[in-house]
Image: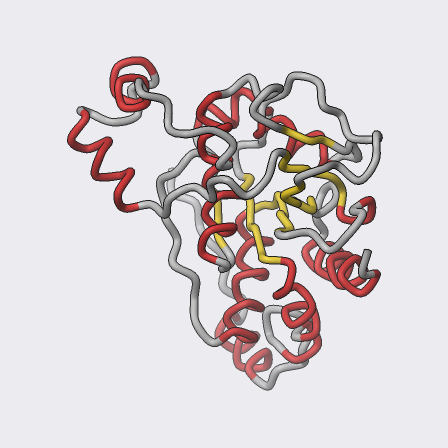
């Protein structure tokens, strides 16, 4: 494992005061050791388990959520997917809209591996494919600001997608930072807090973003604008309406 990636992830964790650890996500053909939990699991719960110290590995055989299996590329799209999304989950008004959403979002990263592992970044056996930060909106804004400072363009955000798709599948397919707003079902199933988001960054971009911390206003830079910011703020306070 590249210790620089771990150190840089910890710099970002410390900067945003993240609750829990950044989660390393790695596609594996063969798991590197027997420490991974391969019991039945749900992807959104596995992200939470990994955030708080566990080493999880999901595959087609142990995934309890067929949607999660599909979005991670572990299985083909189930033939009843559009029926499920419209008539059971009731996420879309009809199958025309369901098809439109499916065409709009990037396709899942199919046939990459047997397993998708999720573990605290400090426990990763090798440099992961992705690193996920579960955080509040203000914390997420700092990560996006550092990314813009370093990479020069904002990511395209696919605002409606299942948590596992937005947090893993889309950044895996696009190779770009992505934000999951965490769908209502995942919040319920995996106990995400109401204000939490998941910001996922391809691992090869982590060091550049972390190196920007001291240079960027979204990090710790002593930017000249901070004086103007203080002047603009003044003594103003929000007055709540009765």
Task: Name, please, the residue furthest toward the bottom.
Answer: 224
Residue at 62 percent of width and 19 percent of height: 62
Task: Name, please, the residue furthest toward the top.
Answer: 88
Identify the image's colour scheme: rainbow, by chain, secondary structure or one colour.
secondary structure
Image quadrant assignment for residue 190 = top right
The percent coordinates of residue 6 (x first, y second) are 79, 57
- Quadrant location of the N terminus in the rendered image: bottom right
Residue at 53 percent of width and 58 percent of height: 141
Residue at 46 percent of width and 51 percent of height: 173
The percent coordinates of residue 119 (x first, y second) are 74, 39
Q: Is residue 97 above or below residue 66?
A: below
- Number of dots carrying numbers: 0
The percent coordinates of residue 136 (x first, y second) are 58, 45
Q: Is 141 in front, or is 22?
A: 22
Q: Is 219 in front, or is 128?
A: 128
Residue at 69 percent of width and 46 percent of height: 24
Q: Is residue 233 above or below residue 115?
A: below
Q: Is residue 215 above or below residue 28?
A: below
- Quadrant location of the C terminus in the rendered image: top left
Image quadrant assignment for residue 14 = bottom right
Left or right of 124 on screen, residue 199: left
The percent coordinates of residue 222 (x first, y second) are 67, 81
Image quadrant assignment for residue 112 = top right
Q: Is residue 110 above or below residue 223?
A: above
Left or right of 85 on screen, residue 112: right
């Amino acid at each position: 494992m590249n210790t620089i990636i771990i150190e840089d992830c910890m710099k970002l964790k410390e900067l945003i005061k993240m609750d829990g650890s950044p989660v390393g996500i790695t596609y594996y053909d063969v798991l590197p050791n027997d420490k991974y939990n391969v019991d039945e699991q749900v992807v959104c719960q596995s992200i939470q388990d990994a955030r708080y110290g566990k080493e999880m590995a999901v595959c087609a055989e142990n995934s309890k959520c067929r949607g999660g299996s599909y979005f991670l590329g572990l299985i083909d799209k189930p033939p009843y997917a559009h029926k499920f999304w419209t008539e059971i989950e009731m996420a879309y008004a009809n199958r025309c809209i369901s098809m439109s959403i499916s065409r709009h979002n990037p396709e899942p990263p199919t046939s990459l591996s047997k397993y998708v592992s999720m573990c605290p970044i400090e426990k990763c056996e090798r440099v992961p494919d992705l690193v996920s930060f579960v955080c509040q909106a203000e914390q997420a804004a700092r990560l996006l600001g550092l990314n813009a400072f370093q990479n020069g363009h904002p990511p395209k955000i696919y605002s409606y997608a299942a948590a596992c798709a937005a947090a893993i599948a889309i950044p895996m397919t696009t190779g770009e930072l992505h934000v999951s707003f965490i769908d209502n079902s995942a919040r319920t199933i995996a106990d995400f807090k109401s204000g939490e988001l998941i910001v996922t960054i391809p691992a090869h971009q982590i060091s550049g973003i972390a190196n920007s911390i001291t240079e960027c206003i979204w990090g710790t830079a002593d930017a000249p604008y901070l004086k103007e910011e203080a002047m603009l703020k003044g003594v103003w306070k929000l007055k709540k309406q009765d």
